[in-house]
Image (cartoon, helix red, strand yellow):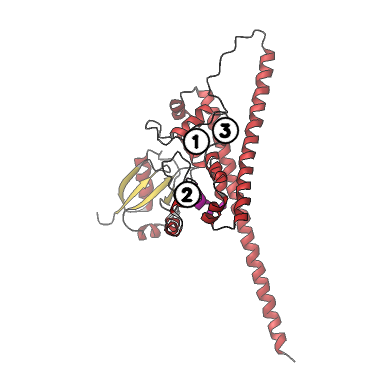
Amino acid sequence: MTDRKPCRVCNFTRQKSYGLAVPSLDDLKVKGCEFLGFSSSDLVTVVLEDDGTIVQDQAYFLCLPSNTKFMLLQEKETWSPVRRMDGGTAWMARESVLLETDTVDTSIAEAPWWDLAQQLKQDLASIILMSEADLQALVDAPCSELASALGFQEKKAEDLQETLQGVLDRREEERQSKELLQLYLKAVEKEDRQEEEPSQPSQEGPDDEDLPDGMEVDSASGFMSRTLMVLKGKTSPETRLSTEDLQMVVSRGVEAMEQVLGWDSTRTTALLQACEAELTRRLQQIQAVQSIRSNAQLDSSQQSGERSAEEGVEAPAEGTD
């Protein structure tokens, strides 16, 4: 039918993508949910895949060109830029940023932290969403080159790296606090036992051992190999993962993650609850930053309006004798 618009839909991980021909935005939601395997009762938000613009208006939908790619987001899922397959530590820059790379030294643009720097250049609040590996890459970047990539003075780049190191230190302190509490609870439980069974070696890997960056995606689970290694081998993995990885874990649900990790229901449920709590905390931080910005802009507008009003009152007075 001629009134149908050809378009494409994908989920927030971009691992599923389908072509559709629909006459309206509502039909896009219905058919998109069907193709992507969402429940018909799920509430979904439609955004443009390339920049995350929310599409709510039917007239705007009809104005978009044919074969526009849309992303359907379920509850607690958020749009994010495309990431390159490099172990989950770099985000591809947006088109506006890619155009700027022609004016930058090629060797710097190819550095592993370059795309992360461009993400910060777009929005410094994205620090909250980064994984520990992302933050460490920026901390380890040469300060002068980082300043050049961000368009900052070198002193400001140094301050930024100190801030990033502070974020890493705070996450490590939170993790150590949780580990101490777990050790205390285990000690109390051990004292309460009348008969002690011989201790068995832990099945988890050593916490202090650095995990190599995984560059491949596990075909069965869809997770980066490095993400799976963090989930299985690190304590408090929710503090180490990026927000996108946390969203992916939470959206899978307990049963699916049991199969991915090979854990029992109790352990898997505890992991998902921790990931969901960490995800909620980060999103609340983002909302707080946005609220502060909005209030600052409002105050600035009010002050500008007050100055204009004062100037308007003083102007006639200058012309009278």
Foreground of the two, 180 or 248:
180
Q: Which SS class for mark 3? A: helix
Task: Give the number of the disc on residue 274.
Answer: 3
- Which callout, 1 or 3, points at the residue further toward the start of the chain? 1
Task: Give the number of the disc on residue 57.
Answer: none
User: Mark 1 is on which residue type?
Assistant: Val
The residue positioned 54% from the left and 46% from the top of the image is 141
Up-down relation of residue 232 to residue 40 (above or below): above
Residue 58: percent from the left, percent from the top?
39, 57
- The N terminus lies in quadrant: bottom left
Q: Circle 2: is it few (<14), some (14-19), or many (20+) Cα within 10 Å?
A: many
What distance separates the C-alpha of mark 1 from that of mark 3? 10 Å
Q: Which of pointers 3 and 2 indicates the residue nearer the eye?
A: 2
What distance separates the C-alpha of mark 3 from that of mark 2? 28 Å
The residue positioned 56% from the left and 13% from the top of the image is 200
Tag 2 and tag 1, C-beta contact below 8 Å: no
Q: Which of pointers 2 and 1 indicates the residue nearer the eye?
A: 2
User: Mark 3 is on which residue type?
Assistant: Ala
Q: Which SS class for mark 2? A: helix
Foreground of the two, 33 or 64:
64
Magenta stretch: helix, strand or loop mostly? helix
Q: Which residues are magenta?
A: 110-124
